[in-house]
Every structure is written in structure tokens, then in C-alpha cells.
Image (cartoon, grey):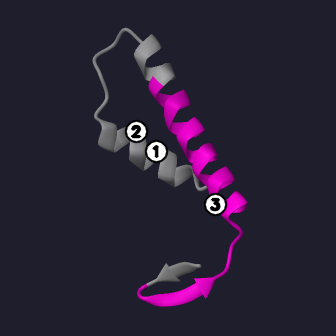
Amino acid sequence: MIRRRDEDVAVVPIEVLREHQDGEEHDINRIIDERMANPSPGVPIEDVMRETLARGE
């Protein structure tokens, strides 16, 4: 069950939720790997998360 603002909004199989979570983790790890390969100063994790969430995939 997925809830938003204390209301049930969807019933989703656990496999779908796991796939979605795995996809998000993959995106975050890819961005981190790209940034770590860049010799310029680091990027705050907040920027990485904002970029990931903005992609909306």
C-alpha cells in the first residue's frame, strides 16, 4: 500500500517497489561515480539528490 498524506493511494506489488528502489539506487550510484571521476572540487550530496529527483525517471 502506498500512502500520501495519511491516505491510501495505491496498492503496488512489492516487486515493483523493489525495482523502483533499485533503479533509484543505481541512478544515485552512477552520479556519485561520475562525480568522483571528476578531479574538480566535490559536489554536495544535496545537489546530487536534487539532480536525481529532478530526472523523475
Q: Nearer the viewer, residue 13 or 52?
A: 13
Compute the Cα span from label 2 to label 1: 5 Å
The answer to whether marks 2 and 1 mark residues whose Cβ atoms lie closer than 8 Å is: yes
Compute the Cα span from label 1 to label 3: 21 Å
Q: Which residues are magenta?
A: 5-32
Picture quadrant where residue 13 is located: bottom right
Q: Residue 17 placed where, x, y %?
A: 64, 60
Picture quadrant where residue 8 is located: bottom right
What residue appears at the point 41 percent right and 45 percent down from the top-left corner?
A: 49
The mark found on residue 51 in the picture is: 1
Q: Which residue is mark 3?
A: 17
* Sooner in the amino-acid sequence: mark 1 or mark 3: 3
Select label 2 or label 3 by which is in front.
3
Label 3 element class = helix
**Is the residue marked by circle 3 packed among few (<14), some (14-19), or many (20+) residues within 10 Å?**
few
Q: Main secondary structure of the magenta part?
A: helix
42 in relation to 31, above or below: above
What amino acid is at disc 3? Leu
Q: Nearer the viewer, residue 40 or 37?
A: 37
What residue appears at the point 41 percent right and 86 percent down from the top-left corner?
A: 5
Label 2 element class = helix
47 left or right, relative to 23: left
Q: Residue 34 placed where, x, y %?
A: 50, 21
Select label 1 or label 3 by which is in front.
3
